[in-house]
Amino acid sequence: MNDNNYKGYRGKALSVLKNFNAQVWSDAEIITANCNYKGIILPRSETADSFHIVIKLRVGYNIGIAADKVLDIKIEGRKEAHYKIPEKEFPTSPNKPKVKLLCTGGTIASRLDYRTGAVIPAFSPGELYSSVPELAHYCNLETEKLYGVFSENMGPEQWIGTAQAIGREIEKGVDGIVIGHGTDTMHHTAAILSFMVQNSPVPIVMVGSQRSSDRPSSDAALNLMHAVKTAAESNIAEVMVCMFGPTSDYYGLLHRGTRVRKMHSSYRSTFRTIGDIPIAKVSRDEIIPLRHDYKQRRKDRNVIINTSFEEKVSIVYYYPNMKPDIIDSLIDNGYKGIVIAGTGLGHVNKPLYPSLKRAHEKGIAVYMTVQTLWGFVQMYVYDTGRDMMELGVVPAANMLPEAAYMKLCWALGQTNDPAKVKEIMLTPIAGEITEREPSNGYLIYQGGLPEVEEFISKYVK
Amino acid sequence: MKEFIFKSFEEMTGKDYETVGFKSGLEIHQQLLTSKKLFCRCPAGMYSEKYDAEILRHMRPTLSELGEYDGTALMEFKTKKDITYRINRDTICTYEMDDTPPFLINEEALDIALGCGMLFDCSIVDELHIVRKQYLDGSIPTGFQRTAIFALNGKIPFKNRQIDIVQMSIEEDSCREVSDSGHSRIYLADRLGMPLIETVTGPNMKTPFEAAEVAEMCANLVRSTNKMRRGIGSAREDVNVSVDGGTRIEIKGVPKIGRIPLLTYNEAMRQWNLLRLRDELHKRKITKDSFSAKWEDITRLVKKVYYQPVRSAIEQGLSVKCVVLSGFAGLLHWQTQTDTYFSKEISDRVRVIACLTNIPNIIHSDSRGENLTSAEWLNIKRAAGATDDDSMVIVWGNEIDTDTAVKEIIIRAKEAAIGVPSETRQALRDGTNGFERILPGPDRMYPDTDLPPTRITSERLEKLQVNLPEKFWEREDWYNQLAIPQDTIRELSISKFAKLFKYVVNEWKINPTLAAVALIQYPKRLKRNGVDVALINEEMMREIFKAYKDGLLSRHGILVAVRKSIVKGKFYSELLPKPVTTKEIDETISAVKEEMKSIKLFDEENTAKVLMGLVMNKVRINVEGKIVSEKILNHI
Ligand SMILES: [Zn+2]
């Protein structure tokens, strides 16, 4: 007997269902001592208990019935869900730019598997067109499913594969690339792609959603429209993250791939450019640059793909009372690079010094970033900073810890020579290090202040 | 179809309602009295029109679990509204804004709900599953309401029969609409997320008045727990109505039970008249299949008309379109409800779906009012290719909205040849109702994957059972036997003092009328004098009754004791009037007798009575009359 017929059920509930031959999707009447329930027997979440049977009542509500109360189940038919997103042919027009959507996973256009909460993605242009028909205004769309992984499961294999796919598409002549990605690690992927894909002649736009598209108020459709418009029409040939500016359905922001970070676990407007300002603002109708120093779109196809990658690199998020064994274990496990997110201007406690020295002597590249996220590492201000530099810890300017991590993986993938690694690390490639932090690069308004509240009341959030 | 013409509301009899096959069911919404909201920890029940920020959202339909789009969802998508939420930072957190996943369900609210389920003799579900019920009108920023059935299959007794309680659900309340005009709708979010229960009855009510009576019963039953929120908007009814051959129509958001009879009468009439309209269409050989309509852009033709709405549309450069409904001549003026005609059904759809919200939004050739001149109509008739047998409907607005409007006009006219379309309708002030949206089906329900199912244990239910009130109708039977004042019975039966009443009457043998008056009338009397009677609690009243029972307080002293206790927040024995000694009574009597010497009594026989009255005026709150009268007898 195929277990799929009793999907998700275990123990008591499974044996009761089997006893009455009541498979999932059965249209059934479940009889108990005090009530009869008519509806469709649904699969059960694997994480739920083994005592209840889930039924979708005729009115559409779900309830769980205790399996040990069931006296009889009468099967009246079967109604299996078919998750097919209707497909409509994506209209093409010779005048419209050609955009390639590469999907890595995430919830950009999808519907939900009610049972596990997993997302069933819409990938084909036809599915996307039936979900977000507005996309056809902007471009001729082609899609390719590279991976189907959750954001947290992205890794070197996927990063390298994505960079190579970008290279292929650029050579084939696309006018822009959109990458669908889960939001949790979107800024990690944005950073590594900024290093692996250089000199791109076209926009490379990463996009996702904070509310999955099975919800009516999802940000997915609008994010996708913004991203596709950017890829098709913008003059910005960089790796960018395109997500909501405010929480309202209003406009998106284009963030530079190396300076962006997810800053809230659930807000729609979670992505923020750190220590600088975004490149541009994008709405359904227009793209408004906020700065002009971005790399321009070109006609040529001279992209450089460099997918070097060293996996034995770690980030250490320093905390007071950290013991040296944390560093020692990295050394002993053969790590080649360590990025420290230090306190303040870039500090760790003294007990770590001997281990840092040992790391340096073993040729391990150790770079310092700041856990304050905003601001530069400055190791000259205090003696302790100078001491650490003598131990071989290299200040990484204002690189975000995640960007520094990705860059160190990439640099160590190219060479083991500490001097060369240092040269790669400290030479800005894609805005990961800036010469200066503009005064509006750090704006976290404090709620509660009258002037801030006044500002908030004037603009939609 | 039976020959029957609706009479006026006052003239309709039970027999008439039976003739048309009137059936009504209720969905009763009642907010729960909790300190916090249902799925977040925001304070409950803090309402204010004040807001300090706005959020803009749009709603898109999504596929259901069974892979289908819901009808309502598609309708709402056609309307493409900008939805603005006005939020106040004190009452709205990132959850209601849909920027944070839900927190676990408020257990206090669930307990109250489960108690109500047991009061209705329902089966309580073994495992609670939260589902998302889609609302694409934007009334909830997520686009769905989190809701769960917790009880099924209950009943209440009514007139020697039984009203079915089909299901009860616990859900979060939605926003209040501020305005809806064109493509912009504004909501105030202060009510959003409040816990409420919805009780659904079977379609068991046979007249509009029965519907109101049952609504009252259901409301009283849950109120008898004293865990329902009171005040404006805290209780709302949706009323379902159908007649033979008609369709179950849901009238949404009836704020007062008293309005149910007229509303349901008008809806029954509307359905009956729509069915008669269908018969008329069939007589004219217009059926679902033979129905035909066409339309024409007549912007060019009406450039010079005088009729103000069309004229200003022309001035704004908008389009004007004319729909020709073949064979419909005269039928747009077919009566549907009191002073309401079929053209209103069309106008409503144009307003809601095509977002042409400025009324009038259509004119038609069956109209008896002033609009176009006959020459202008003739001109349009020729251009649109209409005949004398046809009706013409004219609509104006921007190109896209008038396209939608033309389609909707044709859809609604065609539906007339089929019967009564499935809709939800809004209650209007004059007792009629207007189109709100296409009736949503079960396809708009989705499981909420953000929250785990909650097991409801029998231990939990047993604990709740202990504190449940008796059925208020059982209490009323007992009160009638006790012969307490009629005007205290209903209120006492659902009062928070009902248990105390039972105790003091049964255990302390306190006079039932005295107890009922003290518990129900006194607070009212004090309230009229500006006393905050919300501060009266069971403990306070229990102590006062105890003092009375122990002879420390006279019958007349009770009211004074209640008032004083409210000021102090509690009943203290120091608040008791100083007990009067026998000696003091004697002294008072002597003093009064002295006073009486100067009074000439008309009838000497009355001396004792007058003396009693005067003495009681002085000692009333401290001593029982019985004691005084005995003393007086001794004195004379
Ligand atoms: Zn909240």
Image (tube, coloured by chain):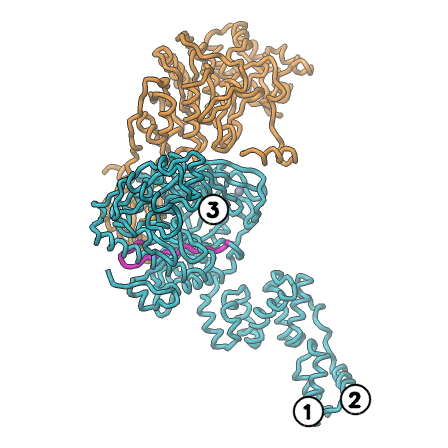
Asked whether mark 1 and ligand 1 are closer than 8 Å, the reply comes as: no
Point out the image quarter for the N terminus of chain B: bottom left
Q: Tell me, what hue is chain B?
A: cyan
Q: Residue B190 got which mark?
A: none
Q: State the CA–CA distance, disc 3 to disc 1.
A: 69 Å
Query: Which secondary structure, mark 3?
Result: loop
Q: Is residue A316 above or below residue B372?
A: above
Dot 1: element: helix
Q: Which residue is mark 3?
A: B174
Q: Name the kind of residue labelled 2 in the image.
A: Ser
- Mark 3 is surrounded, within 10 Å at the Cα level, by few (under 14), some (14 to 19) or many (20 or more) other residues, namely many
Can residue B394 be seen in this snapshot? yes
N-terminal label among 3 and 2:
3
Residue ID for mark 2: B598
Q: What is the chain letter for disc 2?
A: B
Magenta stretch bounds = B233-248
Label 1 neighbour load within 10 Å: few <14, some 14-19, many 20+: few
Q: Colour of chain A?
A: orange
Residue B408 image point, x, y percent: 33, 42
- Name the residue type under label 3: Ser
In the rendered image, residue A190, in percent from the top left (x then y), is placed at 46, 19
Q: Magenta stretch: residue B367 in it?
A: no
Which of the two residues, A92 or B158, is positioned nearer the viewer here?
A92
Q: Do circles 3 and 1 both sit on a common chain?
A: yes
Q: Earlier in the sequence, mark 3 or mark 1?
A: 3
- Residue drawn at x 53%, y 25% is A272
- How far apart marks 2 and 1 lie (CA) works out to 15 Å
Any part of residue B132 in sight: no
Q: Let me know if marks 3 and 2 both belong to one chain.
A: yes
On screen, residue B164 versus residue B527, left or right, reads: left
Q: Is residue A193 left or right of residue A383?
A: left
